[in-house]
């Protein structure tokens, strides 16, 4: 049985690995000339690490990434609001969370997929597919075609495959813009050996800092502003903009930005998608950001793509044919959609709470965070990070 996967990102490679582990012949088609994730960090909570265990790559993540040993919430002036119970969570779930560069994670998944016998073809931009009773024919801009029994579209939050299935559905702007940076920075309050870092909350703004592994740090900022149109900012303008926004914030925020080379600073608007009622049609299904783009406020975008991959492979392990394959994809929706829709909603709600501008609302939020006990944090996060993916 042959499976075709559109997209060589985290979701597409995870899907390819998972399907290969249950015996499918898998080819990944990536539109770009090389595999390259944006220069940003990704947090891998316990549920992501468990999915990576199923895929066989968790060991490499632990070698290349940085465990989260400290996670603080502070005001923009540096006043402590809460310390998240990361040690208690690590004991409960058998693993700490890890932070790793997206490009490093993608490289680990890519190498493992090749080791398992997955074929990855680059510079293959798909245009359309034609489905028959027994197969799907995928067509590319270079005039070539490929055929398989299954097509999984994992082509990101601006998925053209989603457009072909359901017509164009506009993304929803979050109301804030992200700035992200990768650099090298040391501070005795946040030693490399401890791992982790902090998130500081201001008025319609926030800033997060954490260790990334390999001696590097990752930082992000979220700033309330109208959806931006026009010419993108240059690298130097991005850095100046970040320094201007955070020049009076809690140390080490300005120093972290100052230490980051302009070329390693990215900025983009943040979007999600109103949840879809269906991901699949016939022999074709969406996966990851193509199916459920979500805001990054819970750090679950990559994790949910990995969970999708493991669940889909589990449902297809007996290589159903014909109508049985179609029904297996419907079962995939029934299993995954309720969980993912909750996370999309919770991520949007968390963004509203973290990006508040009203002084009164800020005071209420900060008081609630100071009063929250470890048990409350753990109870609220358990449905999210305590998920157990199937065993492949």
Image: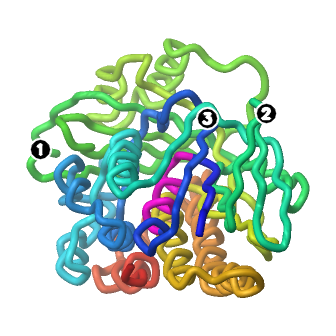
The residue where tag 2 is placed is 143
Callout 1: helix, strand or loop? loop
Residue at 37% of width from left, 55% of height from top?
43
Residue at 38% of width from left, 51% of height from top?
109
Neighbour tally class for label 3: few under 14, some 14-19, many 20 plus, Cα within 10 Å? some
In the image, residue 22 above or below residue 33: below
Residue at 37% of width from left, 83% of height from top?
391
Q: Nearer the viewer, residue 102 or 114?
A: 114
In the image, which disc is placed on residue 250?
Answer: none
Q: Nearer the viewer, residue 127 or 68?
A: 127
In this image, 95 relative to 218: left or right?
left
Q: Earlier in the sequence, mark 3 or mark 2?
A: 2
Callout 3: helix, strand or loop? strand
Residue at 58% of width from left, 53% of height from top?
355
Callout 2: helix, strand or loop? loop
x, y percent for residue 131:
84, 63
Neighbour tally class for label 1: few under 14, some 14-19, many 20 plus, Cα within 10 Å? some
x, y percent for residue 24:
51, 68
State how far apart marks 1 and 2 are (Cα).
54 Å
The residue where tag 1 is placed is 191
x, y percent for residue 349:
62, 67
Q: Quadrant location of the N terminus?
A: bottom right
Image depth: mark 3 or mark 2 in front: 2
The residue where tag 3 is placed is 268
In the image, residue 52 above or below residue 355: below
Residue 16 within the segment the image draws in magenta: yes
Majority secondary structure of magenta residues: helix
Task: Kindly indicate whether the residue at mark 2 contacts the one at mark 1 (C-beta within 8 angstroms).
Answer: no
Q: Quadrant location of the C terminus?
A: bottom left
State how far apart marks 3 and 1 are (Cα).
29 Å
Q: Earlier in the sequence, mark 3 or mark 1?
A: 1
Image depth: mark 3 or mark 1 in front: 3
């Amino acid at each position: 049985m042959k499976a075709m996967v559109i997209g060589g990102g985290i979701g597409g490679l995870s899907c390819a690995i998972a399907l290969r582990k249950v015996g499918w012949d898998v080819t990944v088609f990536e539109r770009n000339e090389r595999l390259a994730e944006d220069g940003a960090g990704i947090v891998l909570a316990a549920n992501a690490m468990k999915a990576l265990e199923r895929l066989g790559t968790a060991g490499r993540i632990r070698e290349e990434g940085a465990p989260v040993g400290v996670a603080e919430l502070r005001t923009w002036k540096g006043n402590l609001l809460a310390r998240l119970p990361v040690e208690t969570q690590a004991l409960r779930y058998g693993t700490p969370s890890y932070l790793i560069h997206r490009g490093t994670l993608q490289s680990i998944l890519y190498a493992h997929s090749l080791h398992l016998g997955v074929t990855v073809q680059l510079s293959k931009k798909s245009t359309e597919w034609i489905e028959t009773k027994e197969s799907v024919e995928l067509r590319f801009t270079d005039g070539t075609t490929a055929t398989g029994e299954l097509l999984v579209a994992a082509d990101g939050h601006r998925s053209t495959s989603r457009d072909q299935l359901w017509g164009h559905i506009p993304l929803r702007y979050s109301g804030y813009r992200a700035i992200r940076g990768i650099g090298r920075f040391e501070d005795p309050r946040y030693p490399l050996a401890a791992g982790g870092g902090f998130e500081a909350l201001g008025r319609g703004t926030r800033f997060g800092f954490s260790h990334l592994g390999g001696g590097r740090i990752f930082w992000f900022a979220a700033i309330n502003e109208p959806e931006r149109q026009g010419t993108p900012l240059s690298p130097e303008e991005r850095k100046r903009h970040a320094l201007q926004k955070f020049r009076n914030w809690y140390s080490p925020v300005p120093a972290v930005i100052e230490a980051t080379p302009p070329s390693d600073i990215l900025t983009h608007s943040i979007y999600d998608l109103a949840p879809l009622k269906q991901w699949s049609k016939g022999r074709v299904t969406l996966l990851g950001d193509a199916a459920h783009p979500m805001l990054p406020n819970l750090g679950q975008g990559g994790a949910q793509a990995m969970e999708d991959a493991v669940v889909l492979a589990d449902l297809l392990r007996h290589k159903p044919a014909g109508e049985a394959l179609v029904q297996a994809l419907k079962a995939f929706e029934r299993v995954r959609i309720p969980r993912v829709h909750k996370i999309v909603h919770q991520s949007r709600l968390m963004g509203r709470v973290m990006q508040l501008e009203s002084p009164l609302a800020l005071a209420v939020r900060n008081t609630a965070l100071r009063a929250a006990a470890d048990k409350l944090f753990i109870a609220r996060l358990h449905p999210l990070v305590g998920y157990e993916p199937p065993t492949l």
